[in-house]
Image (cartoon, grey):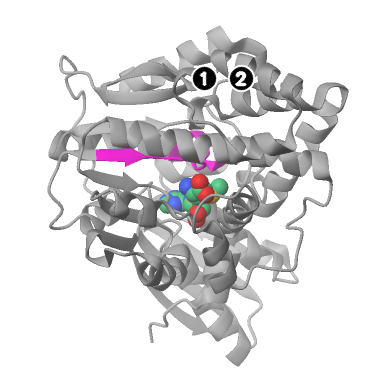
């Protein structure tokens, strides 16, 4: 019997959603309109969300406020009437955009979409302009379904997501956004490619000699919350090699027929409320530092020709049975942030009701496995006493490559 993954299974397969809770708490602290009401309604009061240190908190708040206010301005300046925020997290952008008369489509993992939708609709003066939907950015089908009935052009905004992806996930997202821009028209705006540059320059200009130590603590907090090993991939610019890594990110976009215009942050950043926490010298240094950081406006390269026909994606399917003391499952399609919790729920339900000593996963029709899928496979592997009784069979080259690149082949194959 197929069981719906509950909140708990979704949370364990996708811990990255917790980073969005930290972000809205920082926004409330920075005085961003309606963020405090969202924090109230979600019951997020009481903790320091891992940032007891006031300097670390100030640095993060400056980054978050500058990003939110500048992104809102850049989205509005495009003149495009529909903002697709991918991922929307728990921010008040839906309320803000709908007040400006823009249609807002907020997409995020189902666990976030389900939780934030009633909160945002209850705060908005124009809820009819808002749609919040669960989707996985690496899964084109889920994005298309979520946008069903929406009319282009779209201004797609991506804040705080690309750094959590592996190379293959980042490439899937870029390819998916390319497909959406082909279908709907519009543009993609993101601060993510230079997020490390923005963090580095903010902390350096405001916190002086403590900057590096506070930056490292902030990075550790983000990796711990999201359960990712590094916060980088080929889309992310490294402050230690801005030219080399920017070129690599631009080349990656070119491979998918996209081109980037770099928009200067300082030239587009509104005045920040957090300035009242800074001295005049700190404000001057911060504004000067932001002249070296850019957000990227990404559009279709009209001359680009698709090389290969995309492989058709099969819908996810999982068939399982417990035989003797073995859990046997065959998988089809993509095991990603949306589908992996289904597998975890099924596995835990069977484990609770049976004595299971072995697992056999038939991967003949498994096309793709994302970090969430890998995380669930690892949980299953770890729960066996005799690890040699975990077997993945008929693993195709695409999945084998993902396991090898992430190092999971060491345990799982
Ligand atoms: C740091 S938060 C940023 C949220 C929001 N944009 C903000 O600025 O606060 C990262 C978000 O990415 C979402 N996310 C992670 N992987 C995703 C995926 N594959 N598809 C859609 N959303 C994803 C998480 O659920 C989380 O809400």
Say whether residue 82 is magenta.
no
Marker count (numbered): 2
SS for callout 1: helix
SS for callout 2: helix
Q: Position of residue 170 (x, y in %)?
A: 44, 36
Looking at the image, residue 230 lies above or below residue 264: below
Quarter of the N terminus within the rendering: bottom left
Write the start and end of the magenta stretch as one range. 155-170
Kindly identify the residue that appears in the image at 32 percent across and 25 percent down: 298
Q: Position of residue 241 (x, y in %)?
A: 62, 11
Viewer-side residue, 299 vs 96: 96
Distance Cα–Cα, label 2 vs label 1: 6 Å
Q: Residue furthest bottom?
A: 353
Q: Is residue 286 visible?
A: yes
Viewer-side residue, 304 vs 205: 205
Kindly identify the residue that appears in the image at 69 percent across and 45 percent down: 223
Do tag 2 and tag 1 residues touch (Cβ < 8 Å)? yes
Q: Which residue is mark 1?
A: 266
Looking at the image, residue 220 lies above or below residue 37: above
Q: Residue furthest top?
A: 243
Viewer-side residue, 187 vs 302: 187
Viewer-side residue, 38 vs 365: 38
Mark number for residue 317? none
Is 68 positioned to the left or the right of 36 in the image?
Answer: left
Q: Which residue is mark 2?
A: 287
């Amino acid at each position: 019997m197929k069981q719906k993954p509950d909140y708990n299974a979704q949370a364990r397969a996708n811990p990255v959603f917790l980073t969005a809770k930290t972000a809205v708490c920082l926004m409330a602290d920075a005085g961003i309109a309606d963020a405090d009401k969202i924090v109230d309604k979600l019951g997020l009061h009481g903790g320091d969300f891992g940032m007891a240190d006031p300097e670390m908190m100030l640095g993060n708040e400056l980054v978050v406020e500058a990003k939110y206010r500048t992104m809102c301005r850049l989205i509005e300046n495009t003149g495009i009437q529909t903002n697709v925020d991918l991922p929307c997290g728990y921010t008040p952008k839906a309320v803000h955009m709908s007040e400006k008369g823009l249609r807002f489509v907020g997409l995020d993992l189902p666990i976030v979409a389900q939780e934030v939708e009633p909160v945002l609709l209850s705060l908005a003066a124009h809820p009819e302009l808002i749609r919040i939907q669960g989707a996985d950015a690496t899964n084109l089908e889920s994005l298309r379904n979520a946008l069903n009935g929406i009319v282009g052009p779209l201004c797609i905004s991506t804040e705080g997501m690309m750094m959590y992806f592996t190379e293959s996930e980042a490439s899937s997202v870029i390819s998916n956004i390319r497909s959406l821009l082909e279908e709907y028209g519009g543009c993609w705006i993101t601060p993510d490619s230079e997020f490390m540059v923005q963090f580095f320059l903010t902390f350096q200009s405001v916190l002086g000699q403590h900057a590096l130590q506070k930056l490292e603590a902030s990075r550790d907090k983000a990796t711990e919350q999201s359960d990712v090993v590094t916060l980088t991939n080929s889309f992310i610019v490294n402050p230690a090699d801005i030219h080399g890594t920017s070129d690599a990110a631009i080349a990656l976009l070119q491979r998918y027929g996209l081109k980037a215009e770099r928009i200067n942050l300082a030239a587009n950043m509104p005045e920040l409320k957090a300035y009242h926490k800074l001295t005049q010298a700190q404000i001057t240094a911060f504004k000067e530092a932001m002249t070296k950081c850019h957000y990227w406006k990404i559009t279709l390269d009209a001359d680009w020709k698709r090389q290969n026909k995309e492989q058709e994606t099969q819908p996810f399917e999982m068939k399982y049975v417990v035989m003797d003391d073995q859990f046997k499952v065959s998988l089809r399609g993509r095991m990603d942030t949306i589908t992996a919790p289904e597998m975890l729920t099924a596995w835990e339900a069977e484990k609770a009701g049976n004595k299971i000593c072995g697992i056999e996963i038939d991967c003949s029709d498994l096309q793709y496995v994302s970090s969430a899928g890998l995380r669930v496979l690892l949980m299953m592997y770890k729960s066996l006493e005799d690890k040699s009784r975990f077997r993945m069979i008929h693993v195709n080259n695409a999945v084998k490559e993902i396991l090898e690149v992430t190092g999971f082949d060491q345990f799982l194959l």
